[in-house]
Image (spheres, helix red, strand yellow):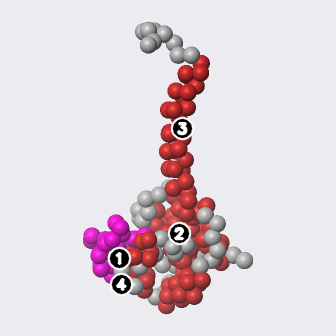
Amino acid sequence: MMKRGARLSKRSRFIWLGLVSLPLLALLYMMLSKTKSRQNVKSSPNKFARDHVLPLIDYTGFHDEMGKILLAQAAFETGNFTSEIFKDNNNMFGMKLPKQRKTTAIGEKHGHATYNSIEENIEDMRLYFNAKKISPTFNTVDSYINKIREKNYFESDPDEYKAGVIYYYNLYFTE
C-alpha cells in the first residue's frame, strides 16, 4: 500500500497514462471517422442514380446544373444511395418531417421524413425551396451550399458538407 504523498514509479505512471489515454484516443478516432466518413469513402458512380434519379430530378423541373447539384447532394446525404434512410424512407436529401410548411411526406422513420416515392421526395424539395424562398437555379455547388446553409438546411460543418457534395459532383460529372 502506498503512503500518502508517495510517488508512482515511472513504469506505473506510464501504465496509468496508457489506461487513461487509450479509451480517449479510441473515442476521438470514432468521432472523427463518423464526421468525415461520407466524403472520404472511395465510391464509384451509382448506376441507379445515373439511370433513374437524375432523370427524375430533371422531370420534376430541376434542370441542367441544378439537377446535377441535387444529385451530388443526394449522393452525399445517402452515402451514394446506400443509407437506411434512403432505402427505408425514399428520402435522398436527409429531410426532416416539416412542422409548418406544405409537404409530400407521409410520416417519419429513423428521425427523418418518409415518402411514398423518390418523386415525392424531389417534389418536397421543391416545396422546401418555395417555402424558404430559394430560387432553384444555381450554377455552382458553392453558391447552392451557401444558400441552404443560410436557410439552416443542414446541421453539419459547412466546409465538410460542401466538400462532400463537391466530391460526389466530381465523381458523377467530371471525367
Left or right: 148 with respect to 114? right
Figure quadrant of the N terminus = top left
Q: Are marks 1 and 2 in contact (CB under 8 Å)?
A: no
Mark closer to the chain start, 1 or 3: 3
**Pointer 3: what residue?**
22
Task: Say what amino acid the circle numbered 4 marks.
Answer: Asn
| Mark 2 vs 3, N-terminal side | 3
Query: Would you say residue 106 sits in the magenta stretch?
Result: yes
Q: CA distance from mark 4 to mark 3?
A: 46 Å
- Marked residue nearer the N-terminal end (4 or 3): 3
Q: Amino acid at mark 1?
A: Thr
Spatial separation of the CA atoms under disc 1 and disc 2? 18 Å
Task: Provide the secondary structure element on which disc 1 rests.
Answer: strand
113 or 103, which is in the foreground? Answer: 113
The residue pinned by badge 1 equals 114
What is the number of the mark on residue 79? 2
Percent across and percent down for residue 166 are 60, 67
